[in-house]
Image (cartoon, rainbow, N blue to C red):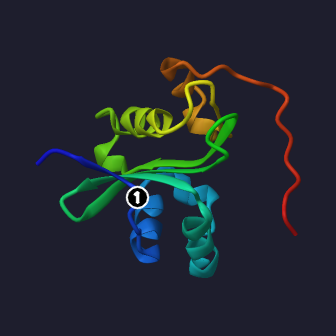
Amino acid sequence: MPVDYRVNVPVGVEAAIELYNRSTLGERRPVNRPDIFAEMLKHANLTITAWDGERLVGIARSLTDWAYVAYLADLAVDADYQKQGIGKRLIAETRQRLWPECMIVLLAAPLANDYYPKLGFEHNPRAWMLKGR
């Protein structure tokens, strides 16, 4: 069965947490806080999801103004589905919905540092973070 890509469809908190746990992103997200996860999903204004039947196998969750910048907050692909082009397609589907001039910015997980240059991303050493309390 081919993977189906959907735009801004509701994603259940449990399904999202299960996906993040089946990807390497679960290590760096508050998977033990469904209340936070609910807000993460609710307030993203561009979410592209990948589905194998009714199983959520990928997500690109972004916050954007559509014209200048899109922050790709999460790109997660189920470990059993990686290396099949799903992440690349999620980014392409995201980009297709933005203005052509709009840049996509992300913070890469350590294991993904070699992945993003293959997709045309450029490294930028000027990112800064102020962590929550």
Frontmost residue, 102 versus 74: 102
Q: Secondary structure at mark 1?
A: helix
Q: Is residue 54 above or below residue 57?
A: below
User: Mark 1 highlights which residue?
Assistant: 22
Residue type at mark 1 is: Arg
| Image quadrant where one finds the C terminus | bottom right
Rendered residue at 85%/47% (across/down): 129
Rendered residue at 64%/74% (across/down): 36
Is 124 placed left or right of 118 in the picture? right
Q: Residue reaching furthest left?
A: 1
Is 33 placed left or right of 15 in the picture? right
Give x and y (percent) for residue 90. 41, 40
Rendered residue at 41%/32% (across/down): 88
Q: Quadrant of residue 33?
A: bottom right
Give x and y (percent) for residue 105. 67, 35
Q: Is residue 35 above or below residue 84?
A: below
